[in-house]
Amino acid sequence: MNTQSFDQKVDSIIQEVMQTKETIPDDQSLDELGLTSMKFIELVIKCEERFEFNLEDSYLLKEFFDTPAKIKETLQQQHSLTEMKEL
C-alpha cells in the first residue's frame, strides 16, 4: 500500500470515529477534540479491521493514538512487525 492511500485510510478512520468531515491536522491532539475512552477503543478496533492485523498489547495505549501522526507511525510500525513475523 502506498503512503498516500495509507494516510487517507487512517484519516478516514479518524474522521469516522471523531464524527467530523474535516481532515484533522497530523499534529492535532485528539484528546483536545474529545477522544474519550470509548472512542479510543472504537479507533483501535477500526484500525485493526481496516488494516487486517491486531495491534500488539504494548501499542494499546492512548499515547500511541494522541495525534493522527502518532497513529500513522504506530500502525506503520505494527504493520512492519506483522510482516516480519509472517516471513
Image (spheres, helix red, strand yellow):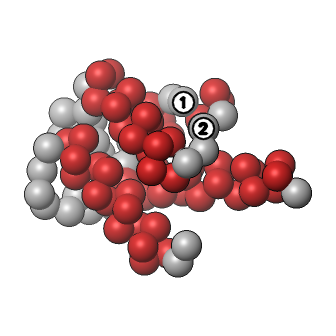
SS assignment at label 2: loop
| Residue identified by numbered label 2 | 55
- The image quarter in which residue 45 lies: top left
Return the residue nearer the eye: 48 or 62: 48
Residue 65 at least partly seen: no
Which label was assigned to residue 60? 1
Q: Is residue 8 above or below residue 42?
A: below
Percent position (x, y) of residue 16? Answer: 22, 47
Q: Residue at x 59, y 58 (%)?
A: 76
Q: Residue at x 43, y 77 (%)?
A: 4
In terms of sequence position, does the residue under pointer 2 or pointer 1 come before the other? 2
Amino acid marked by disc 2:
Leu
Q: Amino acid at mark 1?
A: Leu
Distance CA(mark 2)–CA(mark 1): 7 Å
Label 2 crowd (10 A; few <14 / some 14-19 / many >=20): some
Q: Are marks 2 and 1 in contact (CB under 8 Å)?
A: yes
Extreme residue in the right direction: 87
Secondary structure state at the residue bearing disc 1: loop
Q: Nearer the viewer, mark 2 or mark 1?
A: 2
Where residue 9 appears, as percent x and y from the top left, is 38, 62
Say if residue 33 shows up in the picture: yes
- Position of the N terminus by quadrant: bottom right
47 or 72, nearer to the observer: 47
Q: Residue at x 75, y 56 (%)?
A: 83
- CA neighbours of label 1 inside 10 A, class few (<14), some (14 to 19), many (20+): some
